[in-house]
Image: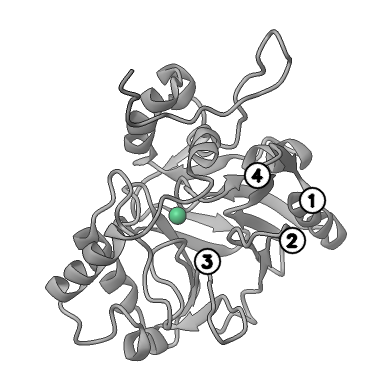
Amino acid sequence: MGHQDYPSLTLSSSHRQILGRQYLVTDPYTKDAVLIDTVLDYDPASGTLSTATADGILAFVRHHGFHVTKILETHAHADHLTASQYIKHHLPGDIPICIGERIAQVQKHFGPVYGLAPQNLSMSFDVFLKDDDVFMIGSLPVQVLHLPGHTPDHVGYLVGKSVFTGDSIFMPDLGSARADFPGGDARALYRSLQKLLSLPDDYEIFVGHDYPNGRDKNCATTVVEQREHNKHVKSGTTERDFVDFRTTRDKVLKAPRLIHPSLQVNVRAGRLPPPDPTTGLSYFRTPLYGALNI
Ligand SMILES: [Fe+2]
């Protein structure tokens, strides 16, 4: 079956920045649905949060009468803030927020950087998914695929012939995600990409980002297109070639602009830092590296 048989909706943030692909996947017969990688709008210069994009998703869900049963993350994103907690609190039922179980490694690394209490982190998500776990969206089985490399916790979701790959593989002309975040590993990423490329030819790959240059934005390809054309891992690319390329490339990439706000929210399943008792405002922390010689 093609994805017309397993309908999915892809949404880009309506904010000025292109923040990430968000997906709603539904069983059209039962109207059960999951949301994948929802996004809050955030302007770091003014410190302004907006739920405009998330409210659009909520309106769409309500309009179509979908019953969201799970809010899924592919990983703790470093370039946008998840709207999972907001979505959870604005839809009926206690919808579980789910992430790969290796989020614990990411929390262990970043918790101390931002002064986050370990007990709050371990309680933050509702479900920690194991590799190859299977759950249902109505009558559709979903398989959890561990796809480490970009981050250690990274998972994809295989639904019928559609796989939602987060930040692992990108559109063929863009190639692959970076692998230099803490716990990232170019070798592991190569193996994750091989796992995706070993799926049948006609399986559809829905990516987590798209940064087109000279073409329209897109979100989906097929496994065979990726095998034949992926800029970084098309057929015949050896692990050594990929790792050499990825490592060299990652050395010149800058940290994502929203890395610190994103991680402080995303390792806590979308919760904001508690407000300061004096001002009543929440603040993000930015660690300083380097020192003044005074
Ligand atoms: Fe990412």
The three-letter code of the residue at mark 1 reads Ala
CA distance separating discs 2 and 3: 14 Å
Instruction: Please state which of the two labelled residues, at mark 3 or mark 4, is closer to the viewer.
Output: 3
Quarter that holds the N terminus = bottom right
Q: Name the residue that disc number 4 marks.
A: 83
CA distance separating discs 1 and 2: 7 Å
Residue 201 seen in the figure: no
Examine the rendered structure and indicate whether residue 280 appears above or below residue 163.
Answer: above
Examine the rendered structure and indicate whether residue 180 appears above or below residue 195.
Answer: above
Q: Which mark is residue 14?
A: 2
Q: Secondary structure at mark 2?
A: loop
**Viewer-side residue, 259 vs 148:** 259
- Mark 2 touching mark 4, by CB under 8 A? no
CA distance separating discs 2 and 4: 14 Å
Q: Quadrant of residue 3?
A: bottom right
Name which of mark 2 and mark 3 comes first in the sequence: 2
List x then y, in percent, for residue 118: 41, 20
The three-letter code of the residue at mark 4 reads Ala
Q: Secondary structure at mark 1?
A: helix
List x then y, in percent, for residue 239: 16, 72
Examine the rendered structure and indicate whether residue 27 appears above or below residue 125.
Answer: below
- Mark 1 touching mark 2, by CB under 8 A? yes
Instruction: Please state which of the two labelled residues, at mark 2 or mark 4, is closer to the viewer.
Output: 2
